[in-house]
Amino acid sequence: MIPEDHPRYRSLKVRERLAACAKAGIVTLEGLTAHGRGEAFDYLLGERTTESALLAERCAAALIRTSKRPVLSVNGNTAALAAREIRELQQATSIAVEVNLFHRTEERVERIEALLRGAGVEVLTGRAEPLLPLSHARAYCLREGIYAADTILVPLEDGDRCEALVGMGKRVIAVDLNPLSRTSRCATLTIVDELTRALPEIASASRTMGTDEMRHLSSAIDNRRFLREALAEMNRRLIHALD
Ligand code: PTJ
C-alpha cells in the first residue's frame, strides 16, 4: 500500500501500475527501464507542462486535424499509462489507433488491444505485414493503418521507426521527455512532455481550435526550436536547483 500523503504518491502509483502491467505481459521489462529514463527527464522539467510544450501540443492538434489519415501508434507503455487519455483523444479527433510493438508477439498485441478496448478505444485490427523498411518487428503494421497514414503520433518511440516513417514522407509527432533522443531529433514535431499530460492537451486544443489557427500552426513547425526550448528549461532548472 502506498500512503496517499507520500510526497511521491503519483509517481509511485504509476510505477505500481507499470509493474502490474509488466506481470500481465503488457509492458516489457525493457519498457520499465524506458519509463525510468522518462521520469529522470521529467524531473529536470519540474514534472509540469512548459509553455513551449503547450504550444507543441497545439501544433500537434493542428497537424492531426489537417491530416486525411492520422494514426496513433500504441506500444506497451503507452497503453498501460494512458488508455483513458487515448480514448479522449480519439473522441476529440477521430484519430485511428493501431498497436505497433518493438518486442512484438501476437499474444502481447492481443493483450494490449484488449486493454485499449476495455477503456473504450476503437482499435484497428487485421493482418499486420512487414511494410516498413526496418529489420525488426516494428516493421509489422497494417496496410490500412500506419502504412497508409499521412500523420503518425508516436509516444515513447525508439528512433529507428521514426526515421523510417519520416523517410516514407509521413509527418511524425513524437511525445518524448528526452529532447536529445534520436526520435526527438528526427520527428516532424516533438512534444517534450509526459504522455498523460500531453494527450489531454492535444485533445482539448483540437476541440477548440479554429481553421485559421490550425492552418497557421501546421504550416510553421520548427522542431529544433521546441527541442532547444526544452533543453534551455532543463538547463535553467539545473543551474538554480539549489538556490
Ligand atoms: O512495448 P514495446 O515492445 O513496443 O517497447 C516499447 C519501448 C518503450 C520499450 C521502446 O519503444 C523503447 O525502448 O523506447 P526507448 O528507446 O527507451 O524510448 C522511449 C523514450 O520515451 C525515452 O526517451 C524516454 O525518455 C521517453 N519516455 C518514457 N516515459 C515517458 C516518456 N516520454 C513521455 N512520457 C512518458 N511517460
Image (cartoon, helix red, strand yellow):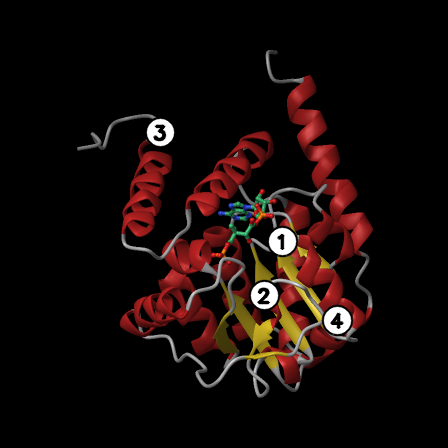
Q: What amino acid type should be assigned to the residue bearing mark 3? A: Arg
Question: Which residue is labeled 3 in the image?
Answer: 8
Residue name at image x 48 percent, y 42 percent:
35
- In terms of image quadrants, where is residue 111? bottom left
Question: Badge 3 local density, few (<14 within 10 Å), some, or many (20+)?
Answer: few
Q: CA distance from mark 4 to mark 1?
A: 24 Å
Q: Please name whichever residue, 111 or 91, is drawn nearer the observer in this view of the structure.
A: 111
Question: Badge 4 local density, few (<14 within 10 Å), some, or many (20+)?
Answer: some
Q: Is the residue marked 2 within 8 Å of ligand 1, measured from its CB? A: yes
Checking the image for residue 92, the label placed there is none
Mark 2 vs 4, N-terminal side: 2
Q: What amino acid type should be assigned to the residue bearing mark 1? A: Asp
Name of the residue lying farthest toward the front: 135
Using the rendered image of the protein, determine whether residue 217 is visible from the camera's viewpoint.
no
| Residue 133: x %, y % from top left | 72, 71
Question: Which residue is labeled 2 in the image?
Answer: 138
Mark 4 vs 1, N-terminal side: 1
Q: What amino acid type should be assigned to the residue bearing mark 2? A: Arg
Q: CA distance from mark 3 to mark 1?
A: 28 Å
Q: Please name whichever residue, 121 or 216, is drawn nearer the observer in this view of the structure.
A: 121
Question: Which residue is labeled 1 in the image?
Answer: 158
Checking the image for residue 218, the label placed there is 4
Q: CA distance from mark 1 to mark 2?
A: 10 Å
Foreground disc of the pair 3, 1? 1
Q: Do labels 1 and 2 touch, CB within 8 Å?
A: yes
Q: Please name whichever residue, 139 or 225, is drawn nearer the observer in this view of the structure.
A: 139
Mark 2 vs 3, N-terminal side: 3
